[in-house]
Amino acid sequence: MAWTKKHLLDIESLTADEITTVLDTARGFKAVGERAIKKVPALRGKTVVNLFVEPSTRTRISFELAAQRLSADIVNFSAEASSFKKGETLKDTALNLQALNADFIIIRHSASGAPHFLSRVLDAHVINAGDGAHAHPTQALLDCFTIRERKGKIAGLNVTILGDILYSRVARSDIWALTKLGAKVTLCGPSTLVPKTFERMGCRVTHDVDEAIRDADIINLLRIQHERQRKTMFPSIGEYTQLFGLNQKRLAKTKPDALIMHPGPINRGVEIDSEIADSNRSVILEQVTNGLAVRMAVLFLVNGGKVPAETSN
Ligand code: CP
């Protein structure tokens, strides 16, 4: 088992062993987070910059906490208060951050490929915190961590991803990660948002929600990503909820131990019934908690940290 990557740009370029390495390393950091003293010195003297050019709550704050727990210095870049407003490019912005001794640039950007571009022009480690509809690798890693922790394995599980797949970077990264680890992935939603072309990624596509969730061990819900949709993809939110929302009637027909997941932010009463979101079937807030340990693991590993000896999948 090894980790050799300087950057974390996507899941597609990781091996199953590398994904498992992140999950095993995160398990150790989760245990650290349960101790009275939650800090370790692994990144002492390093500087991490959160370069978020799109809104975020969970990813930005958990990277900030992860860097602090690893004893790094962390700076949060605010696009609104930056010289982007005066026409400075992304490349020049990043080069200036590097000139200020940034060792890590964590980037979220609306343009797919922005992190890959920065990885070619910077010496600093680049971590993708979500680029357009392309990739959100740390979300997929924390999803896999949560599934493995709750179910004891990933291989052989039926995972249904339900919602706006077409515009979802989470869906693409989850599909890569889950299929590499041996899960059987089903995608479901309106045909405009779940085209059959996704079958090329090694998953099953259906537009029948009851059939999609009936045998699922995991039901991962996605919100409608209005910010990336350039045309109307379905008649109305009300109709979407009626046809594809997870409600009590639909939940009653699922396996009793099926877990409900969602990367957040959730839209209560649209893709998920509010009571289900707050129920003991939901692991949505556990996903958020696990995101901190997973992001600590990612920062630690790309910095060249020693990987744990033991693996399991
Ligand atoms: N899941 C996720 O990426 O949430 P944020 O947009 O709040 O970071």
Image (cartoon, rainbow, N blue to C red):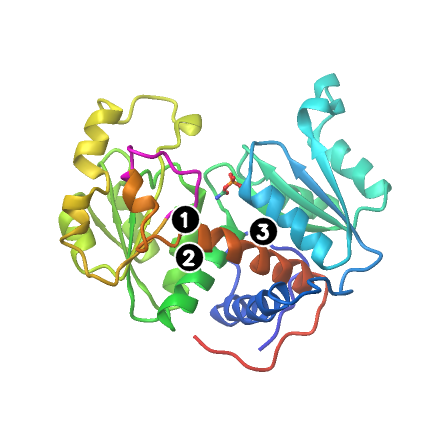
Helix, strand or loop status at disc 3 = loop
Q: Say whether marks 1 and 2 touch (CB < 8 Å).
A: yes
> Is 140 situated left or right of 273 in this image?
right
Depicted 93 relative to depicted 23: above or below: above
Q: Say whether marks 3 and 1 touch (CB < 8 Å).
A: no
Magenta residues, dominant SS class? loop
In the image, what residue type sits under mark 1? Arg
Quadrant position of the C terminus in the picture: bottom left
**Residue 256 image point, x, y percent:** 21, 61
**Crowdedness of circle 2 by 10 Å Cα count: few (<14), some, many (20+)?**
many
Q: Quadrant of residue 231?
A: top left
Residue at image point 54% right, 40% down: 131
Q: Residue 9 — which label?
A: 3
**Crowdedness of circle 1 by 10 Å Cα count: few (<14), some, many (20+)?**
many
Cα separation, mark 3 vs mark 1, equals: 13 Å
Foreground pick, 34 / 300: 34
**Residue 269 image point, x, y percent:** 29, 33
Q: Which residue is mark 2?
A: 176
Residue at image point 62% right, 32% down: 53
Quadrant position of the N terminus in the picture: bottom right
Q: Which residues are magenta?
A: 262-273
> Is 146 situated left or right of 158 in this image?
right
Q: Which residue is mark 1?
A: 172
In the image, what residue type sits under mark 3? Leu
Q: Quadrant of residue 223?
A: top left
| Ligand 1 contact, mark 2 (Cβ < 8 Å) | no
Magenta stretch contains residue 267: yes
**Crowdedness of circle 3 by 10 Å Cα count: few (<14), some, many (20+)?**
many
Helix, strand or loop status at disc 2 = helix
Nearest to N terminus: mark 3 or mark 1: 3
Q: Say whether marks 2 and 3 touch (CB < 8 Å).
A: no
